Image: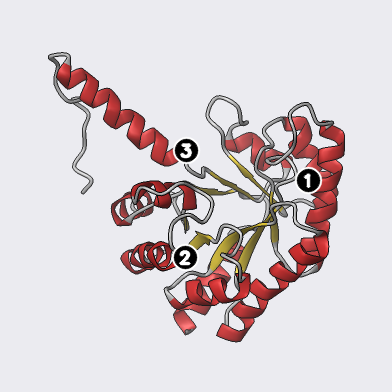
Amino acid sequence: MTDLATRARTLLDLHRPPELLVLANVWDVVSARVVAATPGVRALATASHAIAATFGYEDGEQIPLDLHLDMVGRIARAVDLPVSMDLEAGYGDPGETARRAIGVGVVGGNLEDQLRPLDDAVAAVEAVLRAGRDAGIDFVLNARTDAFLLAEPGADRGALLAEAVRRGQAYLAAGAPVVFVPGVVSREEIAGLVAGLGRGRVSVMSVPAASPPGRELAELGVARVSTGPFTQRVALTALQDAAAELVAGGTLPGATRSLS
């Protein structure tokens, strides 16, 4: 467990400002190895949506937990970097799911609140952190609030920001080191999250053609940026484009590299 404890501490330290932790989410062993071998990469995070899609399941805990954990364990064993898992909403038992994730080599994870009553959401955060302590590691919980992601169309953005901050402050008070707020891409809203939660406490998702670049996120005081399912979509876009070029009479891209 010492190695896991060291990886957990390394992952936690990577959230310290002023540097931004950049996580290009992975979904299988080959994607993990390719990302891990990229200069500058210091940790990995899995994407539940992408892993589910790999096996033909929809997102939202539709993939069986055993299958999900099997893939994440394969990823963790294939690399020498700390691995954070997307725990989704905890599969009905966040503490037990975190315990099992730690058992396959995971040292951190996302946990969705799905806008459950705040007391219930805080209890889930506490259960995950307790699983880490029981295993002898400082589990790096990226406590996710869905205040923006699950908002009704046309909802007041100021009210959503206030709710995200309210929930995030509760998760930080419960011991989570960082709060993940997907659905936020504007500089103003990101700055509002940092003002409400603190520098080095906010995690966001990079959305193609919408999110600020990493250097600006670092300047705003964001701790962590991840890509969710978008890295898999980048890979699949390249695959479909190559297939279209082939069937149109062309050839594969000349810049293709041997990465597997």
Query: Between marks 1 and 2, how big is the CA–CA gap?
Result: 25 Å
Residue topped by disc 2: 82
Q: Residue type at mark 3: give it.
A: Phe
Q: Looking at the image, which is closer to me, 149 or 185?
A: 149
**Residue at coordinates 53% horizontally, 78% vertically from top-left?**
5
Q: Is residue 184 above or below residue 72?
A: above
Residue topped by disc 1: 194
Q: Splitting the image into 4 quarters, where does residue 154 fall?
A: top right
Q: Earlier in the sequence, mark 1 or mark 2?
A: 2
Query: Between marks 3 and 2, how big is the CA–CA gap?
Result: 21 Å
Taking the image as shown, residue 223 lies to the left or right of residue 253, namely right
Residue 73 placement (x, y as % from top left): 38, 68
Q: Residue type at mark 2: give it.
A: Pro
Q: Is residue 203 above or below residue 213?
A: below
Residue 175 placement (x, y as % from top left): 75, 69
Residue topped by disc 3: 230
**Residue at coordinates 43% horizontally, 40% vertically from top-left?**
231
Residue 47 seen from this side:
no
Discs 3/2, front: 3
